[in-house]
Image: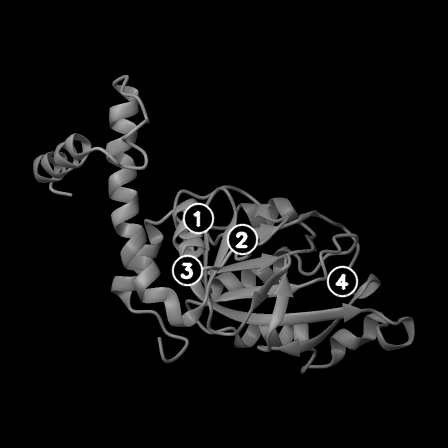
Amino acid sequence: MSDDTLSDEIRGKLENASTASIATALYKRGLRNQFIQGVVPVAPKDDNMVGPAFTLRYIPAREDRNPITVFRDPDHPQRLAVETCPKGHVLVMDARQDARAATAGSILVTRLARRGAAGIVSDGGFRDAEGIGALDMPAYFARPSAPTNLTLHEAIDINVPISCGDVAVFPGDVLVGDKDGVMVVPAHLVEEIAEECLGMETFEDFVLEQVNAGKSIIGLYPCTKTENQTKYEAWRKKTGR
């Protein structure tokens, strides 16, 4: 990928890829630390979250810099991030894995959803989590947290490289979230990972069918027996996969 856009084809493939398959595909390429640690869905969604990263970085709040009046500033970075995150992107927040204060609440996240964002991820807390969970847009966080972000966090930078859950996230990297959590796919690998995972998901559907029918996983997963490869090819023809 040369920019922050995703084709409908690539987005569609990633919408059908599990974070487990993506983790395995990245591991084959030597990337072992792409799963954002400590975040879970605010409320599970049936569809994957897929979108390029648009980032917001928080630093520890200093009391003299973060009175409640800072929100009067139209250029406050937290508000600006919500109003400038491009459609189809995922707003990713670096809260230093500190969930003692919120990084956003339902009003801001609702605004983000109405603007067409693909999702939001924070390694900190959200306030009004029930309202965020009720939105159609996927959201991931560490846990609910009522205190305003100003209590512990100062929003300082927009769309710069950040850390989120111990993973380096660069603007334009692609985030894929499912019910297990969120993977970060480096931008230059997105197309090949999407293609590889499509095949992995098809094969694993075949394997699950075989396992449910009582077959042993030895020689099946991974597929090391020719007879199982032959069965798989026949299954693909039969199912149109």
Coloring applied to the structure: one colour
When the figure is inspected, residue 200 is found, relative to residue 103, above or below; the finding is above
Q: Nearer the viewer, mark 3 or mark 2?
A: 3
Secondary structure of residue under mark 1? helix
Residue 204 % position (x, y): 30, 37
When the figure is inspected, residue 181 is found, relative to residue 103, above or below; the finding is above
Residue nearer the viewer, 67 or 125: 125
Q: The N terminus is located in which quarter?
A: bottom left
Q: Which residue is mark 1?
A: 19
- Residue at figure coordinates x 69%, y 55% from the top left: 124
Which amino acid type is shown beneath numbered disc 2?
Answer: Phe
Q: Which residue is mark 2?
A: 35
Q: Which residue is mark 4?
A: 149
Q: Which residue is mark 3?
A: 29
Dots 1 and 2: beta carbons under 8 Å?
A: yes
**Horizontal side of residue 164 vs 184, given as left or right:** right
Residue 29 % position (x, y): 41, 60
State the residue lying farthest toward the top: 214
Q: Nearer the viewer, mark 4 or mark 3?
A: 3
